[in-house]
Image (cartoon, rainbow, N blue to C red):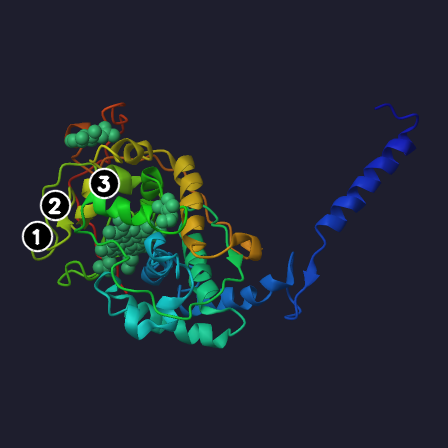
Amino acid sequence: MAFKTLAALLTVVATLQVTSAALTKRVACPDGKNTATNAACCPLFALRDDLQKSLFNNGACNAEAHEALRLTFHDGIAISNKTGNHGGADGSIMIFDKIETAYHPNIGLDEVVASQKPIQARHPDVNPADFIQFAGALAVSNCPGAPQLPFFVGRKVATAAAPDGLVPEPFHSVERILDRFADAGPVGFEDVEVVWALSAHTIAAANDVDPTTPGTPFDSTPAIFDTQFFLETQLHGTTFTGSGKVKGEHKSAIKGEMRLASDHKLARHNRTACEWQSFVNNPQKLHDRFIDAWLKISLLGQDQDLLTDCTEVIPVPKTIDVQATFPPTLSNKNVEQACADTPFPTLASAPGPATSIPPIQR
Ligand code: HEM
Ligand SMILES: *[C@@H]1O[C@H](CO)[C@@H](O)[C@H](O)[C@H]1NC(C)=O
Ligand SMILES: *[C@@H]1O[C@H](CO)[C@@H](O)[C@H](O)[C@H]1NC(C)=O
């Protein structure tokens, strides 16, 4: 394209700017403070501020933040293609909390729902189904290194409790876990997507697997969204934290750490081991694939086309620049290589003597 004069070119540029401004026209929210691309997102600003203040200790990746992420999964995964795809991310775990938090895999979530429910009640414009997923996406944004998770609003809510038996347990076999995920929704999850979803365990701890040691983290950096979880689960296990072997637990390589038997086996099974290893020291992949897997969980049982994208309300998490490292005194020698295709990446070991990871305080 040739422009006869500079003025003609500037006119074209101005026209393009007007067009793009029209496309991104924002609405003023009734709160008088915020604007949004869609009015449906407006109630989320006040909810965000309330959650940060009353649950997440002013924006921390704390125990409540971890629990909020766990709750997104336990609400969402409760859907089965075999029985007609009722349920999913429909808020049933909060609406029918007396029923669902009594199910064994939901142990501990009674307290989480109890702390979230009054906050939802203060924000009745955000229904329980949206509330749970929003709280989880916001929680993750408090963890340095995390991706900004996509959040959509407008879910339809549960009219019945989900049945028991749909949430995987740490003592289940790999086959049973992969079958359960494959049956979640009309599409289901492929084996690799299950690995992607388990990135969540990089910001996680167990309170009830071994109740004698609540707050036992799954990796050495439970307040950072990094790839240490995928590395540390691949190490030869040597120690139990707490009362010794309990159901669903495998020895971990670091004192103070909890290794779920399910994570241990998924890291070593030939359907999942190579995907598991591929995350070690690959934060970009961790971001991209966790966004995919979590969005899918957060939309189970819902039609995305009927929802509104409100990702703009989720803060952009702090970035970090860290290399995955072996814990002090451990090295590539301690890796239980399971992926047959590619060697485990060569990484440095953290300096100093062996340490014990402190429990997460409530
Ligand atoms: C094979 C599938 C999974 C199994 C067997 C499993 C099992 C568990 C168990 C036993 C705990 C400890 C609960 C406690 O004692 O307090 C836990 C914690 C957690 N899980 Fe999973 N999980 C699975 C998948 C997922 C997925 C897909 C997500 C999220 C997308 C997730 C998020 C979390 C989080 C954030 C915690 C930490 C909660 C806290 O720190 O209090 N999990 N999981
Ligand atoms: C869901 O169920 C239908 C009908 O039984 C079946 O044809 C389809 O393959 C199932 N989808 C998955 C992911 O299992
Ligand atoms: C995994 O191993 C089992 C037996 O150990 C074998 O039957 C199966 O074909 C293997 N699967 C893959 C994907 O390599």
Give the residue displayed 72% in from the left and 49% down from the top: 23
Tag 1 near tag 2, CB within 8 Å: yes
Q: Quadrant of residue 25?
A: bottom right
For label 1, the residue is 245
For label 3, the residue is 266
Instruction: Establish whether ligand 1 lies closer than 8 Å to the Cβ of label 2.
Output: no
Q: How many marks?
A: 3
Tag 1 near tag 3, CB within 8 Å: no
Give the residue displayed 21% in from the left and 43% down from the top: 174
Work out whether mark 2 precedes mark 3 in sequence or the reverse, and give the earlier one. Answer: 2
- Mark 3 is on which residue type? Leu
Given residues 50 and 123, the one toward you in this image is: 123
Q: Would residue 46 be found to the left or right of residue 113 on screen?
A: right
For label 2, the residue is 251
Q: Quadrant of residue 118?
A: bottom left
Q: Nearer the viewer, mark 1 or mark 3?
A: 3
> Does 12 sit above or below residue 217?
above
Q: Would residue 271 be found to the left or right of residue 288 on screen?
A: left
What is the distance, in whole Å, between disc 1 and disc 3 at their CAs? 19 Å
> Does 212 sit above or below residue 288?
below
Q: Would residue 74 be found to the left or right of residue 340 on screen?
A: right
